[in-house]
Amino acid sequence: MNFKVQTIQVALFIKDLNIAGYDKYALIGDLKEKVGSIFDAEPVVLPLPPNAPSDIPRVILNNKEGSYNCNIALNRVDVFKNKPQSEEDLKVFLDDQKEKTIIVFDFLKEKHVVVNRVGFIVTSLVEIEDKTGPEYLKEAFVASGKLDDPRELRMIYNKRENDFNHLIKMTTKQDNKLLLQIDVNTIPELMAEADFDGEKLESILNYAIEKIIKIQGSFPNFNI
């Protein structure tokens, strides 16, 4: 089965960034100095009203090649790698994403920002031979005689283990493709007490990488 990685994302959930003295432009300058050439394109600052939802990005950083971007909201910072073009091993992409995320995380900690939840998400396009995506998903996961001839089919599966959610989303339409999203994240109930340091973050990212590779490698059997 052919998996083509579409996006790799790490979400760093933070306590409210809307603190005294917070300045978007100063933040951009400091972050760009920290991350060097990763986000070398012109940043985007969105002119949102003060009462806009906290999860809407206030600042978007990109690189000129379009391969990386970073969305900064008041309660989360998302680091993306978009559509890797080469045929490198999945672990190479995930390790690269870990390194970029640690750089951004170190910057947040220098600013005394509390990171209290992490999600590592990989979205891949799966090409299926000889049948449509809905047909494949139905045969693999649905009991015989159920869901007769679906045109579209979506499934969500979550297993909670070791203080992590292992969230798997499968989406199909009437073609021979399946969109597979694997999201390994720390559970929300622990956020109130969490304040990750660099060692803890790296252990979380290493755990997520191991599980993502294992889940995708065993698909359609979810060997978590």
Image: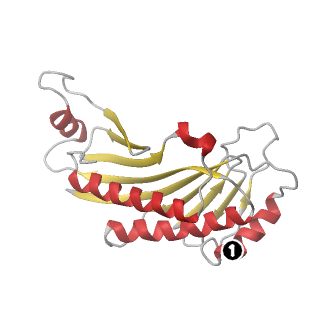
Identity of the residue furthest to the front in this view? 193
Confirm whether residue 84 shows in the render: no
Q: Say whether residue 103 is left or right of residue 133.
A: right
Q: Is residue 155 above or below residue 3?
A: above
Q: Amino acid at mark 1?
A: Lys
Which one is nearer the viewer's eye here, 193 or 127?
Answer: 193
Q: Quadrant of residue 113?
A: bottom right
Q: Position of residue 16 (x, y in %)?
A: 73, 46
Q: Secondary structure at mark 1?
A: helix
Which residue extends farthest bottom? 36
Give the residue pinned by disc 1.
34
Which residue is rendered at x = 71% and y = 38% of the image? Answer: 53
Specify whether residue 113 is in view. yes
Query: Can you say which quadrant of the picture contains the N terminus?
Result: bottom left
Q: Measuring from the top left, give residue 57's x and y in whole percent.
A: 68, 49
Q: Nearer the viewer, residue 161 or 10?
A: 161
Relative height, residue 205 to residue 131 (above, below): below
| Residue 27 located left or right of residue 124 | right
**Position above or below: 200 against 179:** below
Which residue is located at x 22 percent, y 37 percent?
137
Residue located 80% across and 58% down the image: 24
